[in-house]
Amino acid sequence: MTTRDLSKAALAVIEKSGRAFIASVDDEGFPNLKAMLKPREHNGISSFDI
């Protein structure tokens, strides 16, 4: 699967979802989890406006 295919698949999930959970780990290993409503607008998978 190419990067372009992965981007298309990710956008399809974003369009169908009502909310999203964004998770990361900081430099000290602590998790960070945020819930987001479905973006109103987006620029591919680069940026989202909620």
Image (cartoon, grey):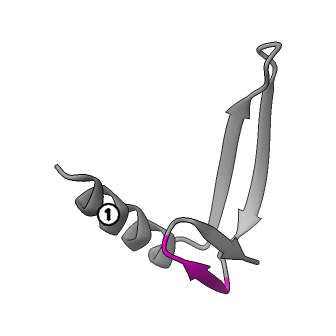
Left or right: where does residue 1 sit relative to residue 20? left
At x 57%, y 65%, the residue is 46
- Tell which residue pokes out farthest to the top in this image: 28
At x 83%, y 13%, the residue is 28
Q: Which picture quadrant has residue 36?
A: bottom right
At x 40%, y 62%, the residue is 10
Q: Mark 1 points at which residue?
A: 9
Question: What secondary structure is the magenta-colored segment mainly?
Answer: strand
Left or right: where does residue 36 sit relative to residue 2? right
User: In x, y percent, where is residue 8?
Assistant: 32, 68
Between residues 16 and 47, which one lies in front from this camera angle? 47
- Tell which residue pokes out farthest to the left in this image: 1
At x 36%, y 62%, the residue is 7
Q: Give the range drawn in magenta.
A: 40-44
Question: With respect to residue 29, does 45 lie above or below?
Answer: below
User: In x, y percent, where is residue 2?
Assistant: 20, 52
Question: With respect to residue 9, does 28 lie above or below?
Answer: above
Q: What element carries label 1?
A: helix
Between residues 43 and 16, which one lies in front from this camera angle? 43
The crowd level at tag 1 (other Cα within 10 Å; few <14, some 14-19, many 20+) is few
Quarter of the picture containing the C terminus is: bottom right
Q: Which picture quadrant has residue 5?
A: bottom left
Type of the residue with mark 1: Ala
